[in-house]
Image (tube, rainbow, N blue to C red):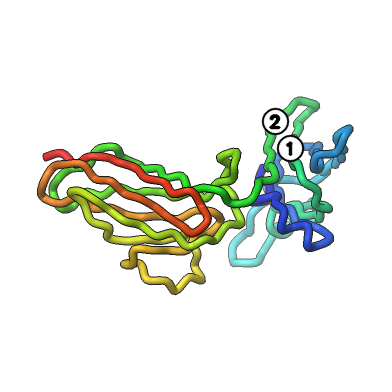
Amino acid sequence: MRIGLYWCENQRDSKQSHSILIVFGRSLNQRVGGSSPPRFTIIPLGYAFPRPGMERDYGIYPPRAKALRSTANLQLNWDVPYEPGTLKAVGRKDGEIASTLEISTTGAPAALALLADKQVIAADRRDVAHLTVQIVDENSKIVPVADNEIAFSLEGEGSLIGVDNGNPRSHEDFKSNRRKAFNGLCLAIVQSTARAGRIRVSATSPSLRPASLTFTSQA
C-alpha cells in the first residue's frame, strides 16, 4: 500500500488534494485530517490484485483478465479535501489489519539536518561519503515541499566532488558547491584525499538554521 507523498499547507490553495494508493487488501479505512472526532471513510475495494498478465504478444490479455474488476495501472485514486493533521490509511484483509500508512502536515522550513552514510572513509583519494541534507520544520519533520537553495563548505582532508537533488528537471551544475532542494532533500558527495584526518562539512541556507557534520578518513 502506498499513500501520497505529502500532506502540507500549500495544498489548501486547491480545493482537493490528489491521493494515490496502491492497495493489496480487501478494504481500506481512511482517516482524514485532524478532525475532532476523527472522520473515517471505509472503502470496500472489490478489486482484484494483481491483474493477470498478458499472453503471447504485447497487449493481448486472456478472457479471464478482461472479466476482472481492476484498474489499468493497479492504483486506486481519489481526491481528499485538505485539512491540517494526519492522513491515515489502514488496509484490511479478512477483517485483520494488513498494512497501515500515514502522512502528517508539516510546518514551515526552519532548519537543516545533515546525515552521512559513513562515519569513516578510506584515505585513498577514491572513497566517498554521501551526505543527505534535510530541510525540516520546528519538530524535525522533513518539509517535502521545500526547495531552498543550500550551500556547502568543507574543511579538512576531503573535497566536495558533486551535488544533486534527484529532480530530473533540474539543470543545475553537479560540480557546484550549492544546490536547490527537491522534496525537502539535497545530496552532497565528499571524496577523501591521500591523507588521513577529519572532514567537516557545513550546509547553510538563508533563513534556515545551518547544519554541520564531522567524519574521518583513515589510511
Indicate which disc residue 126 carries.
Answer: none
x and y percentages locating residue 102 in the rendered image: 69, 39
What's the amino acid at mark 2?
Answer: Ala
**Residue contact at pointers 1 and 2, CB within 8 angstroms:** yes
Q: Upstream in the sequence, badge 1 or badge 2?
A: 1
Q: Classify 16 as above or below 39.
A: below
C-alpha gap between disc 1 and disc 2: 7 Å
x and y percentages locating residue 75 in the rendered image: 71, 53
Q: Quadrant of residue 34?
A: top right
Q: Is residue 143 left or right of residue 37?
A: left
Q: Which residue is mark 1?
A: 25
- Residue at horizontal 27 percent and vertical 40 percent from the top: 215
49 or 176: nearer the viewer: 176
Q: Residue furthest bottom?
A: 171
Q: Residues within 10 Å of mark 2 (few under 14, many from 20)?
A: some
The quarter of the image holding the C terminus is top left
Q: Is residue 197 visible?
A: yes
